[in-house]
Image (cartoon, helix red, strand yellow):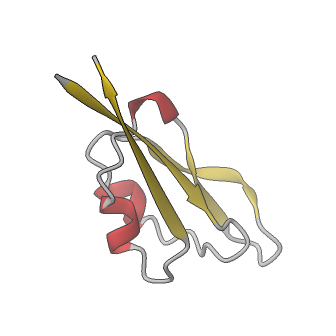
Amino acid sequence: MAKLIGTIEVDTEHCKGCDLCVVACPKKVLELSHEVNAKGYHFSFMARPDDCIGCESCAQVCPDSVIEVWRLKVEA
């Protein structure tokens, strides 16, 4: 049976820290950073990258389209 491994890339300089992606993630992979970007926003990041399944929920709810998702299917 194949397993999906996912990863995301957040454009941290354009992320406004709205928290929608954090709430939408079914695996609780995302959190808001304690650091801020140049505009003063706490941006989203992968706190638990090994748990990402690449479901794209985060990217779909992002109002600014700053999240890119990649998936890789591996044989388990």
* Picture residue at 27% right of the left edge, 16% below the top: 76
Task: Depth check: give the residue in front, 18 or 73.
Answer: 73
Q: Is any atom of residue 5 visible in this view?
A: yes
Taking 23 as reference, is 52 above or below it? above
Quarter of the figure that contains the N terminus: top left
Is 53 displayed left or right of 40 in the figure? left
Residue 53, position as x, y percentages in the image: 33, 40
Residue 25, position as x, y percentages in the image: 32, 51
Task: Depth check: give the residue in front, 11 or 42.
Answer: 11
* Picture residue at 77% right of the left edge, 78% below the top: 39
Residue 21, position as x, y percentages in the image: 40, 62
Is 50 displayed left or right of 36 in the figure? left
Taking 12 as reference, is 1 above or below it? above
Residue found at the very far front of the displayed protein: 75
Residue 24 image-quadrant placement = bottom left
Residue found at the very far top of the displayed protein: 76
Is 75 displayed left or right of 15 in the figure? left
Task: Depth check: give the residue in front, 47 or 18.
Answer: 47
Residue 23, position as x, y percentages in the image: 33, 57
